[in-house]
Image (cartoon, rainbow, N blue to C red):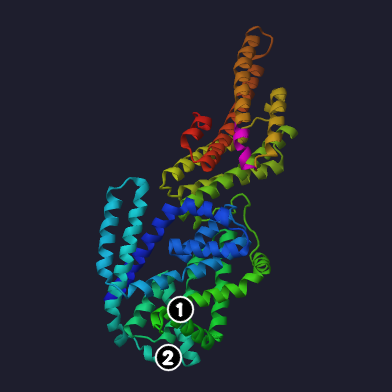
Amino acid sequence: MINVLGGIGLFLLGMTMLTNGLKELAGDALKKWLNRFTGGTITSVLSGALMTMIVQSSTATTLITIGFVSAGLLTFIQSIGVIIGANIGSTSTGWIISLIGFKINMQTMSLPFIALGVFVQLLAPRDFKAAGGILTGFGLLFLGIDVLQGGMASVQDMIPFDSFQADSISGKMILIVLGLVMTVIMQASSAAIAATLTALYAGAIDFEQAAYLVIGQNIGTTATALFAAIGASTAAKRTAMTHVMFNVATAIIVTLGASLMFSLTKTVTTVINGSFDATLGIAVFHTLFSVIGAIIFVPFVRPFARFIEKMIPEKGSYLTRNLDDSVAKVPGVAVEVSFNTLQEITKEVTAVIVALIQTKKMTTESENKLNQIEEAIEKTRAFMDSIQSTSTKDRYKHISLLHALDHLYRLAKALREQNPNTLQLQPALTEKWLHVLEEVLTTIDEDAKLPQIATQLQETSAEMAAERRDKRIAYFERSVENATMLEVTVSKVEALLWLDRLVYHYWRSTARLAEYQTATKKSKHGEATQNYALVD
């Protein structure tokens, strides 16, 4: 039994390292690829299937999808297609194990991969360490199967599989529940399927028992998404509910038509292999299971999406609705979500400043908006603190956004310190800035316009700094000449300094957002730094 547990542990460790390495190495490429190829429902399904085959984890695909929906890279309808595709893609593990895992000496193949992977992780530059994780994970995955295979023969004497025959309703239900529990405990359907295939290969269970275990494991794989959705964003909850409803409905349909599915599986396996092979048959069964579910669901994606949206309506602050802890596990996507959130906060701050200049006072509505802005800044700071950016490009963009966040914090703080008479003391300057802000408010949502906005605000800030220097000297000169009382002079200077601080932090926050956008678009750090990353 200890060999079985150890084998499962090695498999899980290998799968985790493989998945994390692939996400880190291909995360940005996957994001660009999804942007380009995820359009209609069919292409979304194909994208989800291929992405899961690449990262070898439907759970990872689900979490990435949640992040893409949060970042606005995917619509909710598109995400349903990706989830359906992820179910199809997750069957690739069964194919790899059934075609390779039992045909060659796993230990002989796995050890060189582990050795090479560890050396790469220890000696290679930072940007290549992820490749070492992939190699090590691949080796540990197959070493786990080898250990699992060695221990499975003794398990059949300890676990009474004969009591759970698939020829009765109760036996089928028990096997489905066992499969579900296996996946929930292991937190990976791939590991559960590997254990099932190994038990089948060792003769501990027969083909039909294995098939019902796989049905249960397909339901159990939704557990991770459900756990991730607890206290998470609306996007996460909707995606998790989609995953659960699709998998459960597909499991019910396949269970009711099990005899037909078994016949079809045996026919397809025989065509592929020349004769029926039980382990290969499970891979075929799992694929047919997922494909049939996709065929049934795809025509009803839009009404299904509307049903989920009604079931789980949008809640919480709209500014931080996309900040999901599970998304933070995928650095490239998490940074994108942070950018979108900061862009929305900047727009809200702009609206508050415009209202403040127009009304010459902080109204109750503006006060409430400022409270929401401050709360959103704190939540964004906590979210960004949990992001572990490892690639050079992600780190660069992450740093740009931290600068933008800091300037937004200081901007909100300056708005809190506003003197009631400030705007009346500098009417010409505030009116001039109002026109700039009103123009910015109409274009701040457009990512492509951010560099242009940053340049415009840089000029405005430079003009404001020049006005502050010249007027400050003039005010004190008039005070010395007794043309103005010193108290009035000090108030006017304080108003100047406050306006200058406000304009400066507003410019710097948008400049850092523009820097991020330029880096994302062109991937040229030097160019972005030269244009926007001036001293803060």
Q: Nearer the viewer, residue 169 or 200?
A: 200
Amino acid carrying mark 2 in the image: Gln
The reply, left or right, for residue 143 in relation to residue 235 is: left
Q: Nearer the viewer, residue 121 or 341?
A: 121
Residue 471's disc is none
Q: Would you identify the image quadrant in which residue 305 lies? A: bottom right
Residue found 58% across the figure and 58% down from its top: 38
Q: Quadrant of residue 114?
A: bottom left
Sequence-wise first label, 1 or 2: 2
Range covered by the magenta-colored residues: 446-454
Q: Amino acid at mark 1?
A: Val
> What residue do we see at 45% from left, 43% from top?
393
Q: Position of residue 241 (x, y in %)?
A: 58, 68
Residue located farthest toward the top when viewing the structure as drawn: 481
Query: What is the distance, in whole Å, between disc 1 and disc 2 at their CAs?
Result: 15 Å
Q: Which residue is mark 2?
A: 165
Task: Name the image quarter holding the N terminus.
Answer: bottom left
Is residue 449 shown in magenta? Answer: yes
Q: Quick one: 418 or 180, which is closer to the camera?
A: 180
Q: Give the percent coordinates (x, y) of residue 102.
A: 32, 75
Q: Sort mark 2 into few (<14), some (14-19) or many (20+) by Cα contacts within 10 Å.
A: some
**Element type at mark 2:** loop
**Residue at the spot of label 1:** 214
Give above or below for 342 relative to 428: below
